[in-house]
Image (cartoon, rainbow, N blue to C red):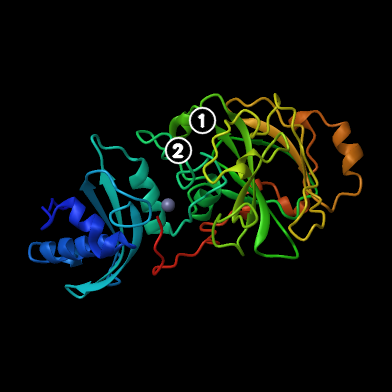
Amino acid sequence: MFGYYRAKHTKAWYEDLNSGINYVGSDSLLNEVLTFFDDSLDYCHYDFEGDSYADAINIVYVGTPKAWAKGLWPHAGHVGQVKDSILLVRYEMTNLASTFSLGTFVHESGHMIFGWPDLYYFGDYCAMGSGTANSPKAPVSPNDFFRADQGWIPLNDVSSTIFSAETTNSSNGYIFKNPSNSDEGYFWSYVKGGWKRWSYLSGSMGLLVFHYNLAEQGNSSPEHLRLRVIEADGGNELLASMVPEPGHAYDLFNEYTQSTLINPLWYDNTESGLRITQIGNPAGTITFTMEGPGSSSSSTTISSSSGTTMILKNEAMGASNFDHRSERFDLLGRNNQQRQD
Ligand SMILES: [Zn+2]
């Protein structure tokens, strides 16, 4: 962190600059800030990787933003200026209201640092959804798909699994890829609502399942979703609103919702062959069984299974489920030029 700057003009001046169209006002303030600090700091100190890039700059201003997607509305964007031979790449701007809260800061930093999109039609299962607005003082974590993509939690590629009985804690991701479309797959993890960064989702624990489609840039409409929550009750409540708040009781797969995921379709309407069943009591860990399309006798096998004792792992899974994890999955690229609210 590096000090504060008193702007040349009133907040209203920046909000209304260029008739308040787009982010002209915030661009003006950004330039003022960078120029001011250029006299007193050496931007080289912020190039930790020695690549002549300062990747990210957080700017927090005092006040309440006036209108969405213009003026000083919180956002992340491109800087593209060279100072002290360092290219300043990205910035985000967040407002500080009557008290400081992390929510918007985390959300905009998600845009700025990782290029994560806004997750509309998604609910509060992520800092990029409505998870920061609803719990600004203790914002919900980025979702596990994004976390696994960064290598923060292990990612288990179970695409070639025939049958496996699993016991997992809340720090594992599972991915089942479409063999015919590298952009598409299912992903799930154990979300322990009420704990740590999931404290806002109190009382909701179970498997949270996503259908991803990386051909989509973001969640712009119910028909174009990069990351869709598969609701455990089979409903589509989350698709009814850009910022849905239907509650969570029936979205997570667990013993109490008695939910199973049976052969969900790919986007071309072919069958995935994925089955997630026998989902247990969500506690410190959760158990479930999963089957892929290669299993000819899977239906009869699963009916005689009793939880975790019966394990018929595919050879590809090996002795350790985690052999197939990647350090950094990196499906989600970042566009440095992109401006995001
Ligand atoms: Zn956003």
Which residue was labeled with disc 2? Answer: 140
Judged from the image, the secondary structure of the residue bearing numbered disc 2 is loop
* Picture quadrant where residue 54 is located: bottom left
Q: Is residue 168 above or below residue 41?
A: above
Q: Amino acid at mark 2?
A: Val
Q: Is residue 54 above or below residue 103?
A: below
Left or right of 83, for residue 231: right
Which residue was labeled with disc 1? Answer: 201
Q: Earlier in the sequence, mark 2 or mark 1?
A: 2
Disc tally is 2
Residue 1 in view:
no
Q: Percent from the top left, x then y, of residue 50? A: 27, 69
Left or right of 105, for residue 116: right
**Circle 2 residues within 10 Å: few <14, some 14–19, many ≥20:** many
Answer whether labels 2 and 1 touch (C-beta < 8 Å): yes
**Circle 1 residues within 10 Å: few <14, some 14–19, many ≥20:** many
Residue 75 in view:
yes
Left or right of 227, for residue 270: right
Front position in the image: 192 or 257:
257
